[in-house]
Image (tube, rainbow, N blue to C red):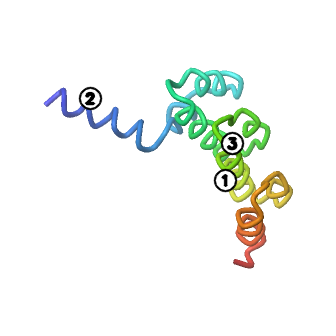
Amino acid sequence: MKFLIALSLLIGLLAFGCVDLLKANPTANTKSEYCSQRATQEDKDYCFMELAETTKNAAVCENVNGSETMADYCYGRYAVAAKDIEGCKHIKNTFLKDGCVEDVSGTG
């Protein structure tokens, strides 16, 4: 039973990222360090995306290194969460940028 609970918690962390752990820690610098210590680049990028969204801090997206598309998604998630259309301007993919602008402006 304890194993199943531990396994469920682990799956939850992997499936839903690091948001709850990040919220428990008060400093953005420590949160970025947490994301940097993730095992794979993909895990790091997802963690940074969630951090940018939850802290409403676009600068966190500069840490996304997996691909240009991952960085675009990071800026999009930030922009929608912060309701900051300027965040959409960092998105390089035209389709994603247009979708971001629509989501933030409420025209979509």
Instruction: Name the secondary structure under disc 1.
Output: helix
Q: Quadrant of residue 41?
A: top right
Gap between marks 3 and 2 measured at Cα = 28 Å
Residue 17 - label: none
The answer to which quarter of the image holds residue 7 is top left
Horizontal and vertical percent position of residue 98: 76, 69
Q: Amino acid at mark 3?
A: Ala
Residue at which label 2 appears: 6
Viewer-nearest residue: 82 or 96: 96
The residue at which mark 1 appears reads as 77
Residue under pointer 3: 52
Q: Residue at x 71, y 68 (%)?
A: 99
Relative placement, left or right, of 7 versus 81 is: left
Q: Is residue 72 above or below residue 59?
A: below
Disc 1 and disc 2 in contact, CB within 8 angstroms: no
Which residue is drawn at the image coordinates 69% and 25% (left, top)?
27
Mark closest to the chain's N terminus, 1 or 2: 2
Q: Amino acid at mark 1?
A: Arg
For label 2, the SS is helix
Marks 1/3: CA–CA distance: 7 Å
Q: Quadrant of the C terminus?
A: bottom right
Label pair 1/3, CB-CB below 8 angstroms: yes
Among the 4 quarters of the image, the one containing residue 9: top left
The residue shown at (51%, 35%) is: 18
First along the sequence among labels 1 and 3: 3
Q: Position of residue 60 (x, y in %)?
A: 73, 36
Measured as percent of width and height from the top left, residue 55 is found at 69, 41
* Residue sitting farthest toward the left: 1
Label 3 neighbour load within 10 Å: few <14, some 14-19, many 20+: many
